[in-house]
Structure formats: structure tokens, C-alpha cells
Image (cartoon, rainbow, N blue to C red):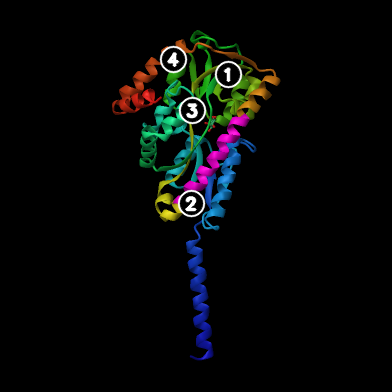
Amino acid sequence: MNYLRKLVLSAATVALAVGLSVSAQAKEWKGWNIHVAGYPNTVAMDKFAELLKEKSGGKMTLKMYHSGTLGSQPDAIEQVRLGGLEIANFNMGPIGPIVPEANVVSLPFIFKNTDHMWRVLDGKAGEMMAAGLEKKGLVPLAWYDAGARSFYNSKKPINAPADVKGMKVRVMSNDLYSGMIKALDGNPSPMAFSEVYQSLKTGVVDGAENNWPSYESTGHFEVAKYYSNSQHLIIPEIVCINADVYNKLSAADQKILKEAAEESAVLQRKLWKEREKASEKKVIAGGVVFNEIPDKSAFQAAMKPVYDKYLADNPDLKPLVKLIQETE
Ligand code: GTR
């Protein structure tokens, strides 16, 4: 082989090798998160990206976009389903309208407490929800904690359902939540998370509902100082990936991805517990008027029409609701 031919051949080999490694190196994934810097989910999603890169030797990389900069939650859910975004941390609330099985977690008072929710998610009911999500193009990788949601408003403490009467209450976009407020004779106002602060401030709505960390991190406590511990919703959050992207990965890469997500969830749940306490302390010190609702039975009884409608719309999901209610 003459010198020139050798040179051409070896150049071709290098080009091929470079080409191969470029195509084996998947493109960087885009990740969506609604929360601000320092929030447990933000820290955990960054950890997820870091673990993913480390465990895959740089083969799988994720760039996180926080603070909802890539759009509202309902829009981002569509984006992950369609593949415009690959990965996200979503609250199950806005996913419910798309995945009826997963909407079961948005039935008020369905979970007795957070531990009950984890037991449910770890069991058969969790598998049914995961299957429902996958059918709609979202593969769940891990569950994050979001504590319990309670009512807060700028007018007065809420002790009984009658206190919600006539109140304009912001809810996440899901008919179950609108039904919940209507069942208490209030006026539901579905709107994006990013709009709530201004709406509370200007009186477009009187109140909203959320957990301690979101009530605090958004500054809602500055403009709606009555926080009433209704704990009417305990909604888990997922870390999920676009199904096509997931299905194209090798089994080994899928395993790495799940491991990284699950490790980030361990961190998130630890940070969550700390932040719940810290946020509560911060808002109380900031002048929030807090009240317990020791007996929630009147609120629970008022939710009957919400359950009736959900079961009438999804008769096949009766066993799932029963399974959750009967899980110890
Ligand atoms: C938070 C949740 C967000 C978002 C928000 C809301 O607790 O973590 O994903 O759903 O509530 O009320 O819109």
C-alpha cells in the first residue's frame, strides 16, 4: 500500500470513529421544572442531571431549565408527551386530565397521610397509574414528595366548608379541583402557578391552596396571610421522560436512568421534610395567621359529588379507588 493510500484510509477510519462516537453520543436532553433555586425539587433535579452524566460516563446528559422558564405546567406536559422536551418533574394534578388512572390522586382526601400515599404508590395502584402514564407517552422514573395542600386566603381563617362560600379560589388546571371548590360553594379559578401571586395581590382571587414550601417560595404568604390546615389534597409528583426517547434506550441505559432518578428522589424527600418545617417557620414568623381544622369530616362529606362525578365518568376505575381506600 503506498503512503498516500494509507493516509486516506487511516483518515477515513478516524472519520468513521468520530462519526460513530458522535451518533452514539445522544443529544443533550432538556428538562423542565417549575420551582425556583434552592427548592427541594430544583436541587434534586440538578442532582439527577449530575448523576445521569456520571453514571453513564457522559453518554446521557440533561440540561435543567428551572422556574418554569420553558412554559406553564400543562404546556410542558404536552411538550414532554410530544418530545419537544425530554424530561420533567411534574405534579400529578395537571397530568390527571390526560391520564384518568393517575387522576385518582387528585380526589380530595383520598390519602390518609403521606405515608399512606407512599404505600399506595409502591403497590398495585401505583403500577396501574404508571401503566396509564406510559400509555399517554410519559414514562415515570421516580416519585417526589409534595406534602399536603391546604387553603390560604387574604380574607379570613377557614374552619368549616361554609367559610369557603363565595370565595374566589385559584386551583390547578383539573376539573376535579374546580369541582372541589364548587362543592364548597366557592368560585374556582384555574390558572397557571406563575400568575397566582399577582392575582392574590390584586384581588383577582381571594385565595389558593398549596403546601408550605410553595406557599412560602412564591411569596403567596405575603399577600394571603390566612393559612388553614385543611390538608385536602396529598398529591405526589413524578420525574418522567418522553416514552419514545425511553424506549430507544438500551436496557442498561434505562437502568442507569431509573437509578439516577431514584437517587435524586431519596434526596428530594429528605430535603422536602426539612423545607416543610423551615417554610412553616418562616411564614409564621412573617405574620401568617395559622389555624388547625381538627375535625375535617364536614369537608370530606362535602366531596361526595366530586367522587360521584369521577366514578360516573370512569366507571372502570371504581376498583382502583376502592383499592386505595382499602390500603392500610
Ligand atoms: C406546587 C407543585 C407545582 C405546581 C404548583 C401549583 O406544589 O410542586 O408543580 O403544581 O404546586 O399549584 O401550580
Is 194 left, or right, of 314 in this rendering?
right
Looking at this view, is 190 or 121 the one in front? Answer: 121
| Residue at mark 2 | 256
Q: Nearer the viewer, mark 1 or mark 3?
A: 3
Q: Residues within 10 Å of mark 1 (few under 14, many from 20)?
A: many
The magenta region covers: 255-275
Question: What's under tag 3, amino acid-wise?
Answer: Asp
Give how far across and how far down residue 74 sits, in percent.
Answer: 48, 35
| Residue at mark 3 | 115
**Sequence-first tag of 1 and 2:** 1
Q: Is residue 45 visible?
A: yes
Distance (Cα) linking label 4 and label 1: 18 Å
Give how far across and how far down residue 13 sits, in percent.
Answer: 49, 76
Q: Is mark 1 within 8 Å of ligand 1?
A: no
| Residue at mark 1 | 152
Give how far across and how far down residue 289 sits, in percent.
Answer: 64, 15
The residue under the point 56% across, 17% down is: 229
Q: Nearer the viewer, mark 3 or mark 4?
A: 3
**Sequence-first tag of 2 and 4:** 2
Q: Residues within 10 Å of mark 3 (few under 14, many from 20)?
A: few
Q: State whether the magenta stretch is mostly helix, strand or loop.
A: helix
Q: Is residue 96 visible?
A: no
| Residue at mark 4 | 300
Secondary structure found at label 4? helix
**Sequence-first tag of 1 and 3:** 3
Question: What's under tag 4, amino acid-wise?
Answer: Gln
